[in-house]
Amino acid sequence: MPKPIRYYTTFRNTIWTVLQERGWEQVSNDTDDWNFIWASVEWISERFDYSHVPDTKFVNHFRNFYILTRKDLMAKNLKAARRNLMKYNLHELGDLFDFVPANFILPMEFGMITEFNRKQTTKPLYIVKPSCRAQGKGIFICGYSDLYAWFNTEFQAKASSGSDREALYVVQKYLDNPLVVCGHKFDLRIYCLVESFQPLVAWICREGFARFSLRPFTANADTRDLEVHLTNVAIQKNSSNYDSRADGAKWSLFQLGCYLETIYGRDEIDVMFLRIEQLIIRSLQAVANDMIKSPCMFEIYGFDVMLDDTLKPWLIEINASPSLSADTREDSIVKRRMLHDAISILGVDVPKPSPDCTRFGCWNKCYSGKVPKFTQIGDPTRFEKELAAGYVSPKRASLGCASERVWGMMVSSPSPS
């Protein structure tokens, strides 16, 4: 009988449950002989650069994962990709990379915020985020005058004293015309599995979530009321309206799609979901040639996307460690199913799907191919063709589809057989 897969993790959420369900053996220390590690991003930063990991093992982060998931670097790299496309007169393609709200990095770009604000006929609100934090921590929303006062007092004081390790902040134009459902603001959490960046092999999970604010949204709502403005579960759990026994302020993508179809029609919603998938692929393309290559690495990203009232998707942020805690029964079902199928795609303990497989469980392959370098475009026509060549299904979305992939997840301790 073959030896069980040995794994190491410090997490005690659905990933631990899934690894136990697969019959794997847990080791107590990261220096032990393991085959698979599900580590925190801190472990990658502190330990991985000083470790030799054979190509036959599996690690759940790329070495420089942060170039895509740190808020300031995500904004910087997507801006650079679009700027290079415009430089070579690929304006139509460059416009397709315009899916991040206007954003600026503090302290370096405060002057650019001032100039941007001066040009606006209607003065916008801004959402201010520490570059390295998650779950809504440290976020606030304000107008330019309050931003100016904060930057010249509290920000400067913390920066000069060194008391704030989040020395970099991202200031993003607040999306003031969000699509709402029954008066409530929402965003989408979508999972993306990247097997490798060179070549780029990426899968999208059909079973993401729409996450709602539990208090109705109005354009003149108090900017200090984060329960109205932010949809993070960590924020909404503090609301008196939150009930984990119900839906936990979440809908499945299929539920959302069905609801929106009654208002906009199926064709419009299919186009909306396709644009979201393309947004995800273009985000990966922008950093594909900068990500450190290693056969042992993979990543499951959590993309946070918002829709405006024209159904245009906007990328808010990308998470290297999307929450795998289960707040509701449906949460547990979806996350365990997503993880089981992702591990099978990687071929850790079962035969890996064939290269021409484009659908496995709740995952659809969305891109498979070499990404040309944005810094070496040379022939624009050839570059555009090479960039498009890897799309698996360029005209049909998989998001929002009902999933027939249901096995034994309705009980507390199923076997993924």
Image: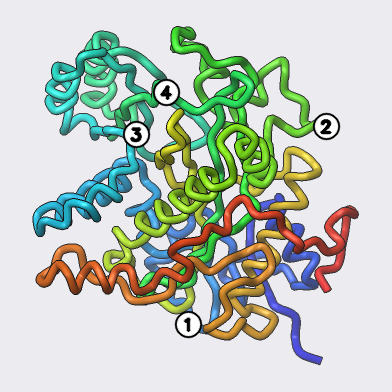
Q: Is residue 139 left or right of residue 107?
A: right
Instruction: State how far apart marks 4 and 1 are (Cα).
Output: 47 Å
* SS for dot 1: loop
Image marks 4 and 2: residues in contact by CB distance under 8 Å? no
Instruction: State how far apart marks 4 and 3 are (Cα).
Output: 29 Å
Amino acid type assigned to the residue bearing label 4 in the image: Asn
Q: Read off the residue under disc 1.
A: 55
Q: Read off the residue under disc 4.
A: 177
Give the vertical position of 287 relative to 59 (above or below): above
Q: Earlier in the sequence, mark 4 or mark 3?
A: 3
Q: Earlier in the sequence, mark 4 or mark 1?
A: 1
Q: Earlier in the sequence, mark 4 or mark 2?
A: 4
Q: Earlier in the sequence, mark 2 or mark 1?
A: 1
**Picture disc at residue 245:** 2
Instruction: State how far apart marks 2 and 3 are (Cα).
Output: 36 Å
Q: Is residue 185 visible?
A: yes
| Residue drawn 33% across the image and 40% down it | 100
